[in-house]
Image (cartoon, coloured by chain):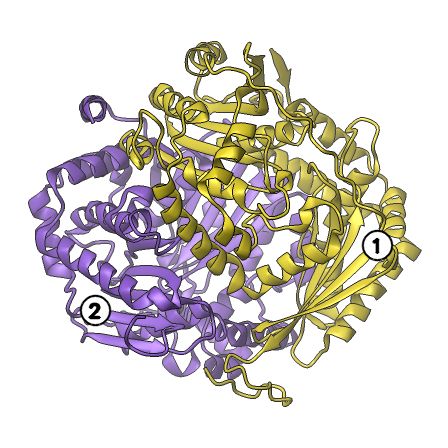
Chain colours: A purple, B yellow
Amino acid sequence: MYINKILGIAVLCTLAGSAFATPQIQHWQSESGARVLFVEDHDIPMLDVAVSVPAGSSYDQAAKSGVAGMTHALLDQGAQGWSEDDISRGMADIGAQLGGSFDQDRASVTLRTLSHATERDQALQIMAQVLQHPVFPDSVLARERTRLLSALKEAETKPEAIASKAFQKAVFGNHPYALPVSGDISGVERITAADLKEFYRTHYNAKRAVVAIMGDVTRAQAEAIAQQLTAQLPAGTAAAQLSVVEMQIPQSEQRIFHPASQSHILIGTPGMSRSDPDYFPLYVGNYILGGGGFVSRLMNEVREKRGLAYSVYSYFMPMKQPGAFQIGLQTKKEQADGALALVRKTVADFVAHGPTEKELTAAKQNIIGGFPLRIDSNRKILDYLSIIGFYELPLTYLDDFSSRVEKVTVAQVRSAYARHIHPEKMATVIVGAPETGSAK
Amino acid sequence: MRIYCAVLLLLWSQQAICAEVAERTLSNGLKVVVKEDHRAPVVVQQIWYKAGSMDERTGKTGVAHVLEHLMFKGTHSIPAGEFSRRIAAAGGRENAFTSNDYTAYFQQLHKSKLPLAMKLESDRMHNLNLSAIEFSKEIKVVMEERRMRTDDEPHALLQEKMMAAIYQEHPYQHPVIGWMSDLEAMSVNDAKDWYQQWYAPNNATLVIAGDVQAKQVFALAERYYGGIPRQAQPARRQFTEPAQVGIKRMVVKAPAELPLLVMSYHAPNLADPKGDWQPYALEMLAGVLGGNESAWLNKHLVREQQIASSVGVGYDSSSRGPGLFTLEATPTAGKSVDEMEAALRAEIARLVKDGISEAELKRVKAQVMAGEVYKLDSVFYQAMQIGQMESIGLGYKAIPLLLEKLQGVTAEQVRQVAQTYLQDDNLTVAVLDPQPLSGKPKHKIEGAAHVH
């Protein structure tokens, strides 16, 4: 205890005064209209690039849920002059990795390649073609639709997937954030190539694109790359406005049958957006409640003290609109009701009383002290560049991060939670629920 | 001090950050390996014990992993939970993992916090306080982990049952997490025995990677770990697996929608990095069959014939025990597992008959070499590789040799290992037979709705 206190003070002193070198972010708008964020770094002879557009699953129509995801998935399955096999072979030949990510808000295409001109040029040429001239071949769509339908049917047998789908619906109701990210079966069955082309034309355009570039190229090269990857994107139309998330939801509890030995429990409510003024109090508070690995309250109550679960967590998913605040755990069926009551009590207690000063100090020590780990690789920096660009966060986001955390007070955490989280009005989903409502 | 550079990096020698690796063995037998990397002010400490589930005996399966959990439950001077609290307060991230071959613990922190991490890690190497109360809670956590990872996960369940069928004698036959009945029968004394037997400096490798100076790390290691007494290590029983003398087949029923076909062949692992050639050829074979989207199985079975909805290939040359070369595939809706198996066999037959092209081999080699450069972006992974190679007995110094040997594999060698090892007598076939969630017999009609 004594040693802990000394250490704590030492940490705070070091951190208050020092600023860890954050990457120097260069920012400009490409001629194409795309916004570019670039960090020049020549330590490793490689280059990482990510192009993001607001074309996630929340831009799907409910009746054709899955079009957004399929559009993204098919980008690299055929482009003008390049068959899907040409694309994958062309990348593999030079050891380059073409990938991507996809969520409710954002569709991204990512590239990692050696920075030597031979490899870099070929990789960028293919990426440029994939982004700007995809062809969505009918034959590929037919095949990928079948594969996706199989995967969706498989997911409907998995307790975690069943829980997640029911949870999103309970939290977001008719808002498009409730739509399954990869689509639903009836929507996917109806997808046509025309839908994909239309979605692509509408949502993949330069003015809304964010290009993140990290690694072994010069500023001049980075400018050319950004232009090469976005100049020929479709002109597009005005950005679609997402409807507003209804923050107040009714209390609900769904108990869904599943033969698994454990109950999979999700509890939550709409949480916060990327631009929420309470972002830092909620984020730091959540470290204490259920985000801080082995040292959170939920972990301590559920796992450390009672051995009720292997994993128990809470998190906020900050999105363009408020994403979910979610608590999750899995526990043996027979003890599920007891564990659920314990989690609810822990959350209610945290929201009612907030953290202690000691807990807040420990949270800050971890988040601030661990800041260098957030930016210790090109991959992680690239992800931050994309996030900062896509969500229009200040370019000084990384520089300010530690001081924003440091300024959070117990009172701010308490009032932020009181505003956002209403424990008596949350959605609960239990898949593999105990047969009766009462615990043994 | 030994310096090695990945072969490819020499091509960019003007900017190559040559991977400097330094090592020293303390007088108590603890081997300390330091990989300097000054790109970010962070450090990772990993301690690797040469004790994994393959060292467990019948009736005591899972104890290596249970002890891994108990290592967070306090020592004679640090109360339960305090280890994690101190690492967290230092801004650190930490965890641990247990495999068939080894058990490892790690912390990632700001470089100034290395002494704290060493103090805590060295303390629990020899001062662990194993109490019956903490054990009784933690064993429940491990059972929940087993339910989550295996019992309720059809693919993991299939894999567990398949390993038990593949190995008749070798301890790879039992799962790392342990059989449930062994966990139920386990006591704190089993954990104590395990700890006393294996947790000693002369059975461990300490790997430190990051923004540190090797000399200073050695001094710190001496200070924190140097005083821990060496311990006599029992002779290790060398297990062999008798030759399989005919195909084995099995079916696992579990709640799922899609079937899964897994075909595993016994294959050699790397024993002599310099003299061996087959394990390298098998690595290349795995790359040619499944290393990228244009590789054989995905190209032929998923894209062209559309008989599989997904395929995978697995082979790992680096292990303490015998190796496996594994193919797995999920048939497309409407195709049976028999058709799937026939299609995989046809691919193998074609490969054995016609061999692979130089272009295909070159592609896989290019991926390997690019991977060596990309690896530099992760200090953690570089430390992992060192720890792994030390723990399985090959040593980290073999890493550059491995790369060199992989580059030397010929197309004919790839064909030869396919011919030699992808043989029925060597094969275990497992099928996941999907069951409806309701427990009622499955509708025969394709695409029939299931009751949840």
Image position, residue A173 (x, y; %): 27, 77
In the rendered view of the protein, which quadrant contains the N terminus of chain B?
top right
Residue A155 appears anywhere in the view? yes
Q: Residue A426 carries which label?
A: 2
Label 1, secondary structure: give it. helix
Query: Looking at numbered disc 2 in the image, what kind of residue is underneath it?
Result: Met
Label 2, secondary structure: give it. loop
User: Is there a contact, CB below 8 Å, between mark 2 and mark 1?
Assistant: no
In the rendered view of the protein, which quadrant contains the C terminus of chain B?
bottom left
* Residue picked out by circle 1: B426
Image position, residue A329 (x, y; %): 35, 59
Q: In which quarter of the image is residue B363?
A: top right
Count the marks: how many?
Answer: 2
Q: Quadrant of residue B319?
A: top right
Residue at mark 2: chain: A
Residue in front for this viewpoint, B25 or A115: B25
Residue at mark 1: chain: B
- Disc 2 versus disc 1: distance between alpha carbons? 55 Å
Above or below, A131 against A111 in this view is below
Which residue is painted at 43% across and 22% down in the image?
B122
Above or below, A392 against A167 in this view is above
Horizontal placement of B18 versus A294: left or right? right
Horizontal placement of B439 versus A291: left or right? right
